[in-house]
Image: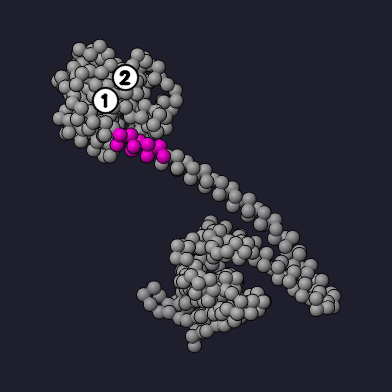
Amino acid sequence: MQSQSPSPQQPSEAVYNAERLEMLDLSTLLDTPPEEIFDRYTELASRCLGVPVSLVSLVTHERQFFKSQIGLPEPWASQRETPLTHSFCQHVVATGEPLIVDNAPLHPLVKDNLAISEIGVMAYAGIPLQALGRYNLGAFCAIDTKPHDWSKQDIDILSALAEAVTREIDLRFVARQLHSQFEELQKLEVLRDDMVQMLVHDLRTPLATLVGGIQTLESMMDPDPIQSELLTISLRGGRTLAQMVDTILDVSRGEAGELALNRQEISPLALIDSALLQVELLSQRKEQELAFKLMPHLPPLFADEEKLSRVLVNLLGNATRHTPREGKIEIRVSSYDDETGKGLLWCVADDGSGIANEDFGRIFEKFGQVGASDTRKSTSGLGLAFCKMVVESHGGRIWVESVLGEGSQFFFTVPSLA
């Protein structure tokens, strides 16, 4: 194949381009150890083309660094770089086009290059490494120590390998960008969580005042039935909002590993009674059946009563919202003794709308709500995330089994400490 000359553009104009040099720095490939992924390509090029030397060369404003090299003589093999006085690859960067040299001492562009006399470069074929389709960072090249008539097949093979190297470099840029975006999102999430915690803390005092004021008003007056119902609704709403505030704070503490448990001996039946009391009004409005089924002779729990009660209230509240009028909701408690240990197995079952399999994982994440918008809008989106944190802090686990249109069963375990 005849030698090809680059365009009239001078190498210095492109090689010294500030934007190109910045992208070369951002690639984080300069002055880094050899990597197997790049070495495989240079070994393959040398073997397929039958030449002793192949390089992945990255060209800066003053040198070329070999991210991968095979066949260079010493000291260049150990140094893994040369000054531009020994670089053919700078001309590939300058033009953005392949440079094919069959006989270097006779080629007008490179005949005075020191790589001929000091490294023994007699023939050269280089393909641009154009990162992100714009930036000529260097060249993927093959070198022979004797004149070489490069065939079209040689150039096709070299071009295919150069494209593979370029894709690998592009992946590094994409990965770096994604990592940078991930770090930025993490910072924004921390900022958001800090703001939420600050706002939530500020809400606790006025909420306590509101609930206390309603209770005082109720005790001071002799309300008629309508007034009594309004006061009850207001009080329940205030307490619900206060529970949402506590849930947000507890989820934040759980994520920070600061969710403290106040363990004490509690009766499973007492826990159920407390939870049913908090959801019975909603279930009565929908004429739903609330029931529970306990295995005989259940041992007492040694757990945080307040937090486990809120777990049950969250699960029962979800069940009442997603179960149609006149539906059934049931709490079941039994003991277990298997390879995982001993404890109590809890289940909240309903015959409501059910949950799709693909949603099983994300419903326990923060704001991982599923279902119709009219059932989501009255919740914080943190209830199941809170349940998961509380159950896991007790050493248990929580999961769901569901069939769309037939209902759901939420299970969780509370292990015995003994």
In space, the residues marked 1 and 2 are separated at their CA atoms by 9 Å
| Residue that sits furthest to the right in the current view | 221
Q: Kindly identify which residue carries mark 1.
A: 126
Q: Position of residue 319 (x, y in %)?
A: 56, 73
- Asked if residue 399 lies in the magenta stretch, the reply is no
Bounds of the magenta segment = 163-174
**Which one is earlier in the sequence, the residue at label 1 or at label 2?**
2
**Amino acid type indicated by mark 1:** Gly
Q: How crowded is mark 1: few (under 14 residues within 10 Å), some or many (20 or more)?
A: many
The picture places residue 342, in percent across and down from the top left corner, at: 42, 77
Check the image and name the residue furthest to the bottom.
Answer: 296
Q: State whether the magenta stretch is mostly helix, strand or loop.
A: helix
Query: Residue 172 colored magenta?
Result: yes
Lateral position of residue 46 relative to residue 403, left or right: left
Q: Is residue 254 among what the camera can see?
A: no
Give the residue at x 40% y 29%. 134
Q: In screen coordinates, is 375 left or right of 2?
A: right
Q: Which mark is residue 91?
A: 2
On screen, 368 above or below 326?
above
Q: In this view, does 340 lie above or below 166?
A: below
Query: Is 348 in front, or is 389?
Result: 348
Q: Nearer the viewer, residue 104 or 209?
A: 104
* Residue type, mark 2 in image: His
Q: Residue at x 59, y 47 (%)?
A: 191
Percent x, y of residue 24 = 39, 29
